[in-house]
Image (cartoon, rainbow, N blue to C red):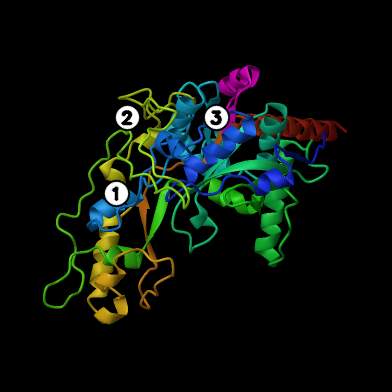
Amino acid sequence: MSDTFFSFWNLDKILSSTKQLGVSACGATALCNTLDALGISQPLDKGVFISAVKTRLRRPDAPLVDYLLSRCEAGTTHADLIAGLSAIAPQATARFFPLHAETFLKEYLPSSISLPPLFSQPEALQALLTPGTLSRWLMYWMRERQCVPILTINPQEGDPRADAWHHQMACRVTITPGRATLSVLTCTLLHTLACLIQMACGVTITPGMEAILLTNPVEALPLAQAIPMVASPPVLRIRTIDVLRRCPRCPTSGRPVVPVPLEFPELPLRTQPRPLPSPPPPADGEPPTDETPAVQLPHPRPISLSPVTKSETTNSDADPSERLPAQRWVDLGVPDAITALVDMAQSIDASALHLSDESQQEQESETPVPEGMPTHIAIPCRYRAGVTLVTVSPDSAEMLRKAPHPFVEWASQCAGLVCDLAMGVSMRVSSTSEL
């Protein structure tokens, strides 16, 4: 078995993997591909996956506040994926690993675990996530423990035109030859050195061949590009034009005005799935049917096998992503940003804002924003960036439950190496002084 890459599927299987099952159904699609990679038989009706992960849709025709509330949770979260997995394939085990350091420290770090002082700050902890450390971590769980990873990413960190978060199953990981045995500290230092050279000299240093092959769509992504997306803060950027189109209009000027009241309620825990749209009509040549799906799913509580978190004070079974306090909208400055946009719109010709009723529906093409206005505003969201590992092996499941979070593992290893290095330097200096 190669030391430089591991793949669940051959090329033909990868190219024939399941494509997007429906609107906002990337989570359901990732779960479908994951069960396929694990060799688990699947329901013939793929709509079962959409229902199992509680797929939610945007509400494009809603007033502004309700529209933004729909955007912050459209699709699914990692907690929904784990709950859906337990319904469709109870023999499988899953665990989510958040990879945004600040989110991990605030929401997922158990109070019983203390990080080395050197890595108590989010910036220091985040620096441990490099193409080298991530590829080696993924390689271990995929090759040695037969775990299938599902990445929850924010594509907006890599492409400003992106309009949503995304779930993708990873079917292959590649490590640069010779890096498989490097220590965490060495991987981190190599990556930091490359970044410093690039900043100082303007010369781009290729960090290696660490890459990951994803499905839906099938794409090979260098881990240096994937890390900002898989380590994103829980924020979603909304296009300015989508905000202004949903503001109330002044009856005389037709310009947008600030909604009253401009308040965002706390979203409740999602213990039950929301109503789903009607199933799509049968394909051409297929007779319509009123039969219920062959597989009936219960509605289990969302499950997360991550350690109990600091924020879980009212319901220990709920993942932190299940809560979205009203204060987060204020802390992120959403009401102020909306008010500022409306104020700027007052001095711009109404026709330049493209606010006609025909444009109410979101368009695939990018609508230009008048000069001087920001292109987006940031809102909080339920999504958490990271990796969900799934396995059907009992031995691997037990290890998955007990494994330390990679941030904890990397910080401990790196702190130990730094201490050893400092001790070695101290002994060297002491020896030289005696001479």
- Give the foreground label among 2 and 1: 2
Q: Amino acid at mark 2?
A: Thr
Instruction: Residue at 57%, 45% (x, y): give it.
Output: 18
Counting residues from the N terminus, which is met first, the one under dot 3 or under dot 2?
Answer: 3
- Give the foreground label among 3 and 2: 2
Q: Nearer the viewer, residue 10 or 280?
A: 280
| Residue that sits furthest to the right in the current view | 435
Q: Nearer the viewer, residue 124 or 150?
A: 150
Q: Which mark is residue 271?
A: 2
Q: Which residues are magenta?
A: 389-404
Image quadrant for the N terminus? Answer: top right
Quadrant of the rendered image containing residue 295: top left
- Give the foreground label among 1 and 3: 1
Assess disc 1: are there few (<14), some (14-19) or many (≥20) residues with their C-alpha within 10 Å of its C-alpha.
many
Check residue 396 for magenta coloring: yes
Q: Which mark is residue 115?
A: 3
Instruction: Determine whether, in the image, residue 131 is placed left or right of residue 96.
Output: right
Q: Which mark is residue 354?
A: none
